[in-house]
């Protein structure tokens, strides 16, 4: 009987004219940041790469959606790689926005970064390279960015350090910074994960739970130039404890048995 391999679960979505990479950007009330961010993404990606940008407006109350739609129209008129806009009718949170963007994406490889401009797009080539290289490890499904030189307030950095330490101790996920929005992953493997609010903070543990290999890349971090953060330390702490226990439960209750295809000779026995 064939042994189970995570690579066998991948679905090849590449069709003629489809992109090789979808860059998914969740955003809420980020009107001043969209234009510079999209321009930086285009400048960072390698020449000749077939890609699309998927902007997900998570129920913004400012001009985020209008600006995104204008940029999409301008990209089409200029013959640039597609820029698509997905919109939530109400705010669902970062994980919901990422999930909607991945579902809509047309490429087999996804890259994500936050819409606030604090995840410099020049990190994207290092993130996507392991997933797009010839002869890539077939078990590799997630390349997670880990921020160095964080440009946040001291209270935010201390709260994040505590949360990351607790999460790493409970889940043993080998990741020091799961809150970083810069990630690249296999679309089919991601869509097979259990979805829940704040899922994006637990992707390394969830991919590992399903038998995939996870790699890490150090990435830079930039100060927020406009707008304001959607999170507070207290709010993160309240939901974080519940989420952490839930993910620990999911890992303990994972499906261990994997199907294997019988050979014709084995089926005849």
Image (cartoon, helix red, strand yellow):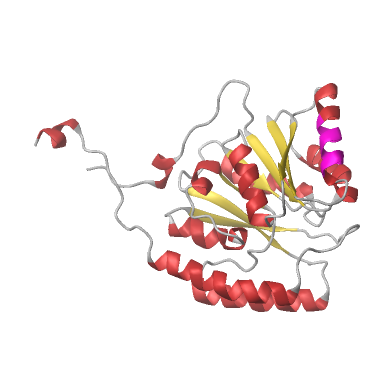
- Which quadrant of the figure contains the C terminus? top left
Q: Position of residue 229 (x, y in %)?
A: 81, 64
Magenta region's main secondary structure? helix
Residue 244 counted in the magenta span: no
Residue at the image position 50 percent from the left and 73 percent from the top: 245
Whether 13 is drawn above or below 127: the answer is above
Residue in the picture at 80% in, 22% down: 79
Residue 202 position within the rendered picture, expressed as x and y whole percent measured from the top left:
57, 62
* Residue found at the very far left of the displayed protein: 269
Q: Which residues are magenta?
A: 65-72
Q: Name the spot of residue 129 as percent of width and height, x first.
A: 63, 43
Viewer-closest of 93 and 121: 93
Is 69 contained in the magenta span?
yes
Q: 190 or 235, which lies in front?
A: 235
Task: Tell me which corner region of the image, top left, top right, bottom left or bottom right, holds residue 93.
Answer: bottom right
Observer-nearest of 51 and 92 = 92
Q: Position of residue 212 (x, y in %)?
A: 46, 53
Considering the image in quadrants, where does the N terminus appear? top left
Residue lying at 26% horizontally and 42% vertically, measured from the top left: 2
Task: Name the quadrant containing residue 106.
Answer: top right
Q: Which quadrant of the figure has residue 131?
A: top right
Q: Number of marks in the image?
A: 0
In percent of the image, x 46 and y 48: which residue is there?
139
Q: Is residue 51 left or right of residue 187?
A: right
């Amino acid at each position: 009987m064939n042994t189970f391999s995570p690579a066998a679960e991948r679905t090849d979505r590449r069709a003629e004219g489809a992109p090789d990479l979808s860059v998914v950007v969740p955003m809420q009330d980020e009107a001043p940041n969209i234009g510079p961010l999209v321009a930086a993404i285009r400048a960072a990606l390698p020449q000749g790469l077939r890609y699309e940008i998927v902007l997900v407006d998570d129920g913004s109350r400012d001009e985020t959606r209008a600006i995104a739609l204008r940029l999409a129209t301008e990209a089409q008129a200029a013959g640039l790689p597609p820029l698509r806009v997905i919109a939530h009718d109400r705010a669902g949170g970062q994980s919901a926005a990422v999930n909607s963007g991945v579902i809509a994406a047309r490429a087999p490889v996804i890259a994500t970064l936050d819409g606030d401009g604090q995840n410099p797009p020049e990190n994207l080539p290092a993130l996507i390279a392991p997933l797009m290289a010839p002869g890539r490890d077939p078990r590799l499904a997630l390349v997670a960015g880990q921020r160095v030189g964080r440009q946040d307030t001291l209270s935010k950095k201390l709260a994040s350090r505590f949360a990351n330490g607790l999460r790493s101790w409970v889940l043993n996920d080998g990741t020091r910074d799961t809150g970083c929005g810069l990630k690249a992953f296999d679309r089919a493997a991601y869509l097979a994960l259990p979805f829940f609010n704040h899922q994006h903070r637990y992707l390394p543990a969830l991919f590992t739970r399903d038998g995939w290999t996870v790699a890490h890349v150090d990435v830079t971090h930039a100060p927020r130039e406009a707008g304001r953060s959607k999170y507070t330390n207290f709010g993160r702490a309240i939901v974080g404890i519940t989420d952490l226990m839930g993910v620990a439960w999911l890992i303990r209750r994972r499906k261990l048995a994997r199907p294997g295809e019988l050979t014709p000779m084995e089926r005849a026995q």
